[in-house]
Image (cartoon, helix red, strand yellow):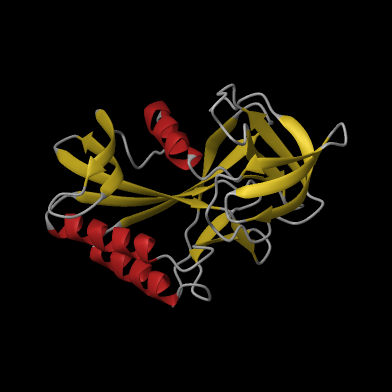
Amino acid sequence: MKLPALEEGVLIRRYKRFLADIETGSGDHITIHCPNTGAMTGCAETGATVWYSKSDNPKRKYPHTWELVDSGHGIVSVNTGRANSLVGEALEAGVIGELRPETIRAEAAIPEGDGRFDFHLRCGARDVYVEVKSVTLLQNGTLGSFPDAVSARATKHLKALMQRVAAGDRAVLVFCAQHCGIEAVTPAADIDATYAATLKEASAAGVEILAYGCRTDLEEFVIDRKLPVMLQG
C-alpha cells in the first residue's frame, strides 16, 4: 500500500478519541484527526515522533490525518481503517498462503445475521468469510495483543464466524499487526477475558486464526510475513 505524502511532527497529546495535537517540523502547533478509536496504549506517548498526511478537501475541519508513530519499539500505523486494504492487497498478491481466492468481495453481508464481514472469498468450491482485526498493542517484548479495550463487537464477529463454520463454510480471522515490532499475536485476556475465551472457542470450532505482520519505509506499508498466534489456556 502506497502511503500518502507524509510530514513529520512530535505528538503533544491525543484526546477526545479522534483528535491529536502535534508540533510540526517548523514549530507550529496544529490539531490533526486521529483515525483510531482504541486505547492506543503505547502508541500515543507525549514526545513521540509522528507522521501525518494532509487532505486537499476544503470541507474538512481538520485537514491533517495522523498516519504513523514511532513507538520506540517499532513504527505503528495508527490508521486502523487501513487494515482491510492491507489484507485485501495481500490476498490479491498471494501473500496469505492459506487463502488462494478466485474471487474477492469486500464488505460482505453476514448470512442470516446482522452486520458485515470484511471479505467474502471463493476458494475452489468453498465460500470463505474473513474478518480482519488491526493489532497495535505491544506487550511483553514482541508480543502483540488484541483487543486494546473491551470489544463486544469483536466477540460478536467471532460468534458469526463460528456460525459460518457450522453452516459448512470456511471462516477465517486475520490479525493484521500494524505495529512493525510485533512478532506474535495473542488475545488480551487481561483486557477482555470474554473475547479471549471466545477466540479459543472459535478456534476449537474450526475458525482459522491467522496473523500477519507489516513493514514500512514511510512511503509504503505492506504485509510481509506470517506471525504465530498464541492462544491462552
Q: Position of residue 66 (x, y in %)?
A: 64, 40
Q: Position of residue 108 (x, y in %)?
A: 24, 40
The residue nearer to you, when weighing 130 against 17, is 17
The answer to which quarter of the image holds residue 113 is bottom left
Q: From what the image shows, is residue 51 above or below residue 115?
A: above
- Specify whether residue 95 is in view: no
Count of numbered tags = 0
Q: Residue furthest right?
A: 27
Question: Residue sitting at 78 percent across and 55 percent down?
Answer: 46
Question: Residue sitting at 74 percent across and 30 percent down?
Answer: 7
The residue nearer to you, when weighing 141 against 77, is 77
Question: Residue sitting at 15 percent across and 49 percent down?
Answer: 111
The residue nearer to you, when weighing 16 against 81, is 16
- Specify whether residue 158 is in view: yes
The residue nearer to you, when weighing 178 against 93, is 178
Q: Position of residue 114 (x, y in %)?
A: 21, 54
Q: Position of residue 142 (x, y in %)?
A: 65, 58
Query: In the rendered view, does 73 fall on the left or right side of 57?
Result: right
Q: From what the image shows, is residue 207 above or below residue 19?
A: below
Query: In the rendered view, does 184 fall on the left or right side of 110?
Result: right
Query: In the rendered view, does 128 fall on the left or right side of 133?
Result: left
Query: In the rendered view, does 116 fall on the left or right side of 188?
Result: left
Picture quarter with the C terminus: bottom left
